Amino acid sequence: MLFVMALLGFLPCAHAAWFEKSAPIMGTRVYVNVWHKDEKLAQAAIEHVFEVMRGVDARLSPYKPDSDLSRLNRVAAKRPVVLTRELLLLLEKSQWAYGVTDGAFDITFASVGRLYDYREKRLPSPEQIQQLLPALSTAHLAFDKAHNTLRFLHPEVALDLGGIAKGYAVDLAIEALKKRGIQHAYVSAGGDSRALGNRGDRPWLIGIKHPRPSKALGEAGTVITLPVDNLSVSTSGDYERFFIDEKSGDRIHHIINPKTGASASGVMSVTVIGPEGLTTDPLSTAIFVLGVAKGLKLIHSIAHYDAIILDSTGQVHYSNGLMPPDES
Ligand code: ADP
Ligand code: MG
């Protein structure tokens, strides 16, 4: 009976179809998949999502000198800077994440992190790290709530929203699609994605990539597949942007432990699932830094969010809200 009703519920859209397109935005590939009966409307909605994403990039990229974030980074050590509503939202959420993760998520990581260049295989020396580490702390951010301003309390502070901006952008994209009457869609920006509704007659499935596919899995590539209707999924991995340091043999990647200024170690990938990208994105980055035990403890303290952690031995750890596949 339930099955028949579900089928009838989907009939009004019987002539609809899936439309999909991708574009390079925010230093990654943005992928949009939309279900609608009007092709023109669907295509316009997809283009609108790209516009929304490009807007976020233009305002929040630390690499674009004209972005709101670059302006803040240039000025806030000298005098208070008035924040846009968007920056305020992201900075407040980042401050929340800093608090609940015991400092593992810290947007001031960039005070040291900006000296890494993964393409050029460059990393800061231990002396440079020691010198800049005192600038790395969200405690240096002095908000004046009455005037909506922010001031940096240390001259070397630099902010980077790379651990939260894509999850936020995916949320904005889904909101934009909903406003256009779309009820079934999927948007991803690199490791951050969100499903609206279901895949039509089945759930949306998101695959978690194996962090070392050639060694462990041959060509298969995916270790775990998750059903994710109406959910956000963020994955942080040490395989997205990295190089192997010739001197030490260490894997130098883009998730920085704020306590040391070096790449975090102990896990290979973290996936967080929950209602909003604004929350899954910083939590996946933070759990990567925290490791298995502290990471699971953290996710268990946050209602409606779950995590899957692949540790550096390849073992998979699931938070309590998930039912792991039977591996017997
Ligand atoms: P991506 O989807 O880009 O792989 P992640 O969610 O894994 O992103 O986050 C990695 C990004 O987060 C880095 O590129 C950097 O911009 C930022 N970041 C790195 N370390 C930290 C940290 N400890 N706290 C906050 N942001 C961080
Ligand atoms: Mg993240």
Image (cartoon, rainbow, N blue to C red):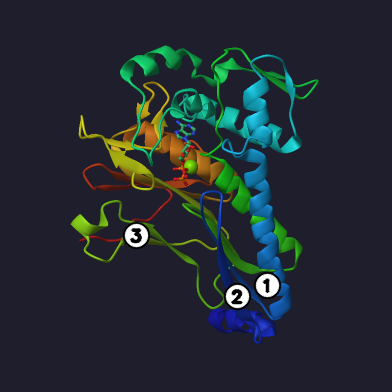
Describe the element under mark 3 as helix, strand or loop: strand
Image x and y of residue 283, in percent: 48, 39
Q: Is mark 3 within 8 Å of ligand 1?
A: no
Q: Residues within 10 Å of mark 1 (few under 14, many from 20)?
A: some
Left or right, residue 215 beside residue 323: left
Q: CA distance from mark 2 to mark 3?
A: 26 Å
Q: Earlier in the sequence, mark 1 or mark 3?
A: 1
Which callout, 2 or 3, points to the residue nearer the camera?
2
Residue type at mark 2 is Phe
Image x and y of residue 109, in percent: 48, 26
The quarter of the image holding the N terminus is bottom right
- Closest to the observer, 5 or 195: 195
Left or right, residue 276 beside residue 290: right
Residue at image position (55%, 40%) is 164
Describe the element under mark 1 as helix, strand or loop: helix
Q: CA distance from mark 1 to mark 2?
A: 7 Å
- Residue placed under numbered mark 2 in the picture: 19
Q: Earlier in the sequence, mark 2 or mark 3?
A: 2
Q: Residues within 10 Å of mark 2 (few under 14, many from 20)?
A: some
- Residue placed under numbered mark 3 in the picture: 224
Instruction: Report if the CB atoms under discs 1 and 2 are less than 8 Å apart.
Output: yes
Picture disc at residue 306: none
Residue at image position (58%, 51%) is 275
- Residue placed under numbered mark 1 in the picture: 43
Residue type at mark 3 is Ile
Q: Earlier in the sequence, mark 1 or mark 2?
A: 2
Instruction: Report if the CB atoms under discs 1 and 3 are less than 8 Å apart.
Output: no
Residue at image position (52%, 45%) is 280
Image x and y of residue 140, in percent: 58, 16
Q: Residue furthest right?
A: 147
